Each structure stands twice: as C-alpha cells, then as structure tokens.
Image (tube, grey):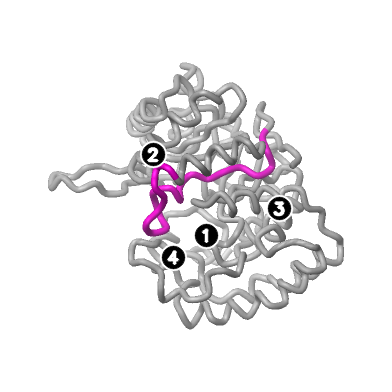
C-alpha cells in the first residue's frame, strides 16, 4: 500500500475511520471487536486513525485512545471538534454544532483527555457553524496549534469558498468529505481546489456506506438507530433502483481481478495522489479487504467503465435528507440555494 501526504505527515493511502465502533450504524462493535480491528489495522500497515468528539458522544475516543497509545510514534491520530454532545437541562445528550472559540477549545481539551494523549496530530472542524465566520473558528484552532495541543488542522464537509477562506487564515492540511463512486460532489470543485492548494482530500465512506460492496441487499432490515434508515438513498424503492448498478460493476471487478469493495477503494485512490481513502468497519475481514484495495492498479478501461456507470445522474436519491443537507457546506447544496 502506497502512502499519501497530509501536511508534514506521511500516511497510509487507506486509513481507518473509527465511527462505526459506537456510532451511526446501529449496534456498533463490542470493545473486543474494536480492539481486534485496530490491532489488525496496525499489523496491516494502516497509519491514519480517525475519530471525533461526536462519535458515541466521546465513546469512540475513549475506546481507541488506550489501544493506540503505545503506537503513537508511528501513527497519525485525527479527531474532530465543533460538533459534539451537549447535555441539556433535562440531562439528555444532544448533538450540537458549535464553532465558537470557546466550544472548540473545550472540545479539544475533552478529546485530549479521552484519547489519553498530549497532542492530536490532525484536528478537524467537524462541521462549519454558519453563525461563526470560518476565519474565527480556524483562528481558534490555530491557537491550539501554537499551544502544542494540535499539530495540523483540517475541515470537514465544506465547499471551495469556505476552504479557501480558511486556508488563508491558517494552512489547512486536509479536507475530509464523503467521496465514492456513489457520491461524487467532490468533483464539483473541492477535489481540484485541494490539489491546487496542496491539501489532502480524505474521502470518508469510500464504500458508499456499505452499498458498493454489494452485501447490503435488504435495507428494510436496518435498525432504527442506523443513520442510513433516514437517508433518501436507502429508502427501499430508491435503493432497489441503485442495486441495479452492482451487476455491471461486478463485471468490471472481474476484469480487475478484485472484489467490489477492493474496486471501490482502488477507484477512489486513482482520483489523485492527494486522495486518502477512509473506510470504517467493525470486522477484521472487511478491514483487510479495504487495505488490499489500496494496492490495486486499475486499467484505463476499467476506470472509464466505472466513470460511465456511476455518473451522478444515474444515482437515485440524495445522500442526506434536508436537515443534514443544511448542516454541510457542499457545492451541490450551495448551488441549489443560490442558483449559481
């Protein structure tokens, strides 16, 4: 598996997202399962591990921190602030987006404590808070760098204009956004802007939230706690239309001599030397399959076939519902709002 640059860091082209252990996809993993996946990733050469204050309202950080601590000198540890659990007057934890300097500092201090480390290698603004100028949020994060609490800064799910404004305030090492054959908003501008500015593009959900490997056939069985159950693309009728893409994709996978999951990872990494794939999983066999995808070279014929098959207009349904769309600064949403 080759490596990619994120700021001053050199990381494995395939990293490991640690959300799945306790957030987003239903039942998650037991601590023993998570530990097995983390150890397998280390043995397979994965050097980028990504978590966030939001994931399990801190549970992911508390889980991965002690396991990764003995390996801190050979890995890049990433986390995110600006979107975390806040306990209301009723005692219930709720997700809150808050990009104020005070919140970001508190989020960072909490993450350092849960992770059991003195410094976070790569610290992201999880979501841009439109109530706070991006310069103000990034400026607060830059002070964390100056204080030695954070080594490099990243942003998540922002568009080109926001990215450029942030980068002028302080160098941005990475932009993390969803990118896969199934979700190609990056090609509307952010992928090229990252290349121009020397920013790594960290592609989360490169397997289309479990769609592209072809193993999820019946979405009616998704748990109510699984975030996909509320996503338009995973509505039963819509998902059935999308499943029709997998048979021709399987033909291309056979030509490449790999599985659907390996093909999806390989395609993402073929989109630029500045692109890092960040899949998440609770299973060791799936992790190893993802890692293998990082070493596969695709022919021009296979790449052209995938591009033709997964044109955006061929995908049924939006990736987010309206509320979640309002929380991301993507070019698609900006275009729909402004008509530009």
* Disc 4: which residue: 228
Q: Nearer the viewer's eye, disc 1 or disc 3?
A: 3
Q: Position of residue 138 (x, y in %)?
A: 48, 33
Residue at the image position 66 percent from the left and 34 percent from the top = 11
The residues tagged by marks 3 and 4 sit, at their Cα atoms, a distance apart of 24 Å
Please provide the residue range marked out in magenta. 11-32
Q: Nearer the viewer's eye, disc 1 or disc 4?
A: 4
Judging from the image, what secondary structure is the residue with disc 4 in? helix
* Disc 1: which residue: 334
| For the residues bearing labels 1 and 2, Cβ distance under 8 angstroms | no
Q: Magenta span: helix, strand or loop, mainly?
A: loop
Q: Of marks 1 and 3, which one's residue comes earlier in the chain?
A: 3
Q: Quadrant of the N terminus?
A: top right
* Disc 3: which residue: 293
* Disc 2: which residue: 53
| Residue 113 in which image quadrant | top left
Residue at the image position 60 percent from the left and 63 percent from the top = 183
Judging from the image, what secondary structure is the residue with disc 3 in? helix
Residue at the image position 44 percent from the left and 65 percent from the top = 228
| For the residues bearing labels 1 and 4, Cβ distance under 8 angstroms | no
Query: Can residue 199 be seen?
Result: no
Judging from the image, what secondary structure is the residue with disc 2 in? loop
Q: Nearer the viewer's eye, disc 3 or disc 4?
A: 3
- The residue lying toward the viewer, choosing from 99 and 91, is 91
């Amino acid at each position: 598996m080759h490596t990619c640059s994120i700021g001053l860091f050199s990381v494995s082209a395939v990293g490991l997202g640690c959300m799945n252990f306790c957030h987003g996809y239903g039942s998650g993993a037991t601590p023993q399962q998570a530990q097995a996946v983390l150890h397998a990733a280390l043995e397979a050469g994965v050097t980028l591990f990504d978590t966030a204050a939001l994931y399990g309202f801190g549970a992911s950080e508390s889980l991965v921190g002690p396991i990764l601590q003995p390996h801190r000198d050979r890995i890049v540890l990433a986390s995110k602030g600006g979107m975390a659990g806040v306990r209301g007057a009723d005692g219930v934890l709720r997700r809150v987006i808050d990009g104020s300097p005070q919140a970001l500092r508190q989020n960072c201090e909490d993450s350092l404590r849960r992770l059991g480390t003195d410094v976070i290698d790569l610290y992201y603004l999880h979501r841009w808070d439109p109530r706070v100028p991006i310069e103000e949020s990034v400026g607060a994060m830059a002070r964390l760098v100056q204080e030695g609490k954070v080594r490099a800064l990243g942003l998540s799910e922002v568009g080109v204009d926001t990215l450029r404004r942030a980068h002028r305030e302080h160098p941005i090492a990475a932009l993390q956004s969803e990118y896969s054959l199934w979700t190609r908003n990056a090609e509307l501008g952010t992928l090229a802007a990252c290349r121009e500015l020397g920013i790594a593009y960290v592609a989360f959900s490169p397997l289309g939230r479990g769609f592209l490997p072809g193993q999820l056939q019946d979405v009616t069985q998704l748990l109510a706690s699984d975030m996909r159950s509320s996503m338009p693309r995973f509505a039963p009728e819509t998902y059935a239309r999308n499943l029709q893409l997998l048979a021709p994709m399987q033909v291309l996978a056979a030509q490449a001599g790999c599985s659907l999951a390996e093909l999806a990872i390989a395609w993402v990494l073929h989109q630029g030397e500045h692109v890092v794939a960040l899949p998440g999983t609770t299973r060791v066999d799936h992790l190893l399959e993802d890692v293998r995808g990082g070493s596969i070279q695709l022919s021009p014929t296979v790449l052209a076939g995938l591009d033709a098959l997964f044109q955006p207009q061929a995908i049924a349904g939006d990736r987010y519902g309206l509320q979640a769309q309002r929380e991301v600064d993507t070019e698609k949403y900006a275009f729909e709002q402004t008509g530009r």
